Image (spheres, coloured by chain):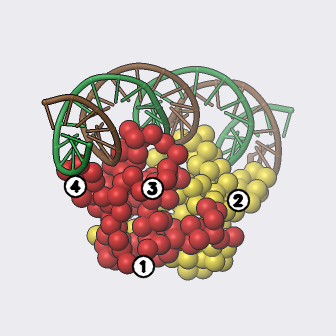
Chain colours: A red, B yellow, C brown, D green
Amino acid sequence: MDLGKVFHALADDSRRRVVAELAADPEDRERACGSFDLPVKKATRTHHFRVLREAGLIVQRDHGNGSAVSLPRQDIERRLPGLLRLLSEELKAGGAAPD
Amino acid sequence: MDLGKVFHALADDSRRRVVAELAADPEDRERACGSFDLPVKKATRTHHFRVLREAGLIVQRDHGNGSAVSLPRQDIERRLPGLLRLLSEELKAGGAAPD
DNA sequence: TCCTAGGTACGACTTGCATCGTACCTGAGG
DNA sequence: CCTCAGGTACGATGCAAGTCGTACCTAGGA
């Protein structure tokens, strides 16, 4: 787990939104990749999921026909305590930081 | 305060190191810009300080002949609780994440 | 079997960024 | 005054990254 990779991954709005939405779900449900309303095309979405995966921020499960992502909350909380809280709070604040 | 700007700023090793060293000082001492041992030239250092400043992660005071930076710890802790702890722990761990 | 939908792989394009050289500015000390 | 050291401003450069089109693959349904 590299902080540089993590911060780089979270510097992008689309990627940060994915992690934030996953973090905002208290039940840690798995979500289909297409269930995120991102303003980018398919290929770009695949790219973003790859970056998040390589940063260790999501786990991707292949469904054959489709794939779904989930949040390794335990790992992240252990190595980066407080991070998920920051992200979900930004989401609640309507896409802006809680200032 | 924009999370995107903050994470982008912290994605760079040199910049993350500056904030981490400032955060690791419990007395919040002001430090001269040249006191950081960064593997870059002067112009690049100026650039990094600008990015950190615009992200709200440091406060820069101009000394005429030189300038110094300090950490607005209260602001950061209020808006981004837990962030400084992550950075200073990475520093203690010797430049690697505490995995 | 054909078609459709969700994802991926690959390449191309464009923008952004980290880096640096150089010139310039400012204050301190001879 | 001159010189030097610490910073900044500006432009150039090389590389990384975001975006997308296209082709391809894999179920599932008609």
Secondary structure under tag 4 reads loop
Q: Check if mark 1's residue and mark 4's residue have beta carbons within 8 Å.
A: no
Q: Mark 2: which amino acid? A: Gln
Which residue is pictured at 60% across the width and 76% down the height? Answer: B77
Q: Mark 3: which amino acid? A: Phe
**Labelled disc at residue A26:** 1
Q: Nearer the viewer, mark 1 or mark 4?
A: 4
In the picture of the structure, the residue carrying the numbered disc 4 is A63
In the picture of the structure, the residue carrying the numbered disc 3 is A36
Q: Mark 1: which amino acid? A: Pro
Which residue is pictured at 47% across the width and 72% down the height? Answer: A24
Secondary structure under tag 2 reads strand
Describe residue A99's horizontal placement relative to residue A95 as left or right: right
Discs 1 and 4 lie in a common subunit = yes
The quadrant of the rendering that contains the C terminus of chain B is bottom left
In the picture of the structure, the residue carrying the numbered disc 2 is B60
Which residue is pictured at 61% across the width and 61% down the height? Answer: A95
Nearer-the-camera pick, A26 or D4: A26
Describe residue D18's horizontal placement relative to residue A58 as left or right: right
Nearer-the-camera pick, A24 or D9: A24
- The answer for how far apart the CA atoms under marks 2 and 4 are is 51 Å
- The answer for how far apart the CA atoms under marks 3 and 1 are is 17 Å
Neighbours of disc 3 within 10 Å: few (<14), some (14-19), many (20+): few
Secondary structure under tag 3 reads loop
Where residue B10 sits in the image (x, y, percent)? 51, 57
